[in-house]
Amino acid sequence: MSPTAHGETIAAIRELANKQHIPVAVRDFAPQEGDSPAQGVRAKISLPEVSPDFEELDQYLDRKPAPLVVLLDGVEDPRNFGAILRSAYAAGVDGVIFRKHRQSPLTDVVFKTSAGCAALIDLYQVTSLDQTVRAMKETGWWIAATTMDEHAVRYSDFDWDRPTVLILGAEGSGVSPVLLKRAEVSIKIPLYREIDSLNVSAAAAVLLFEAAHSRQLIPEV
């Protein structure tokens, strides 16, 4: 913590740290490293554990009526990755699967952008997304891929009330052709104005909160 850090927020951080028996030290440090402002406080953390065993997700098939898993098909921007994890946790997603290669790894930037939600949701890293999707289909998961295809189902018309794996594609290329072929259904977000697509993290938020509403996780106002 910087010697100049003060105010109600800093006092609250100190109080919470004391309650959790987390040591707090006052140090001089640069206000910014790279493009990440410190805002007077820095924390040393261990990044969350990532499991290679996606079959653990099958436990939800018997425990929940409509479990939902997000599968990332090559999201390479760490801030998009972190924002998706934040939305996924807030919207009640049961787990997030991502691959080892051509995908942003779990980094401190991802963790910060997720506002800590990366530590609160189950994460799975796999070698082959294709093999993962095929295995999950065999155990009863319904595979849905996002696309801008005009023949795709509107996201608000999709039946989210079933075990679903939602595939979100890479920032530029979208969902890969091999995974599109594996999907039982393609989902789209209709756009008012003509642009190529939404940012993947923005699209994730729209889709996941529609799913949360459909799965009755969010009470009516």
Image: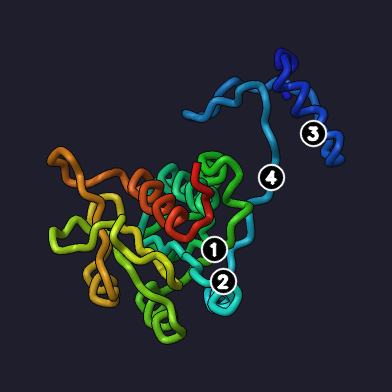
Residue 13 numbered mark, or none: none
Q: Which residue is mark 1?
A: 94
Which label sits in the foreground, 2 or 4? 2
Q: Tell me the residue at 40%/45% (across/down).
A: 80
Q: What kind of residue is marked 4?
A: Ile
Q: What kind of residue is marked 2?
A: Lys
Relative to residue 129, is residue 49 drawn left or right?
right
Q: Tell me the residue at 24%/57% (across/down).
A: 154
Q: CA distance from mark 2 to mark 4?
A: 32 Å
Q: CA distance from mark 2 to mark 3?
A: 34 Å
Q: Which residue is mark 2?
A: 64
Residue contact between numbered discs 2 and 3, judged by CB atoms under 8 Å: no
Q: In the rendered structure, which disc, 2 or 4, sits on the residue that comes first in sequence?
A: 4
Q: Dot 4, crowdedness within 10 Å: few (<14), some or many (≥20)? A: few
Q: CA distance from mark 4 to mark 3?
A: 16 Å
Q: What kind of residue is marked 1?
A: Asp
Residue 16 numbered mark, or none: 3
Residue 45 numbered mark, or none: 4
Q: What kind of residue is marked 3?
A: Leu
Q: Tell me the residue at 48%/55% (across/down).
A: 105
Q: Dot 2, crowdedness within 10 Å: few (<14), some or many (≥20)? A: few
Residue contact between numbered discs 1 and 2, judged by CB atoms under 8 Å: yes
220 is higher (above) or lower (below) than 174: above
Q: Dot 3, crowdedness within 10 Å: few (<14), some or many (≥20)? A: few
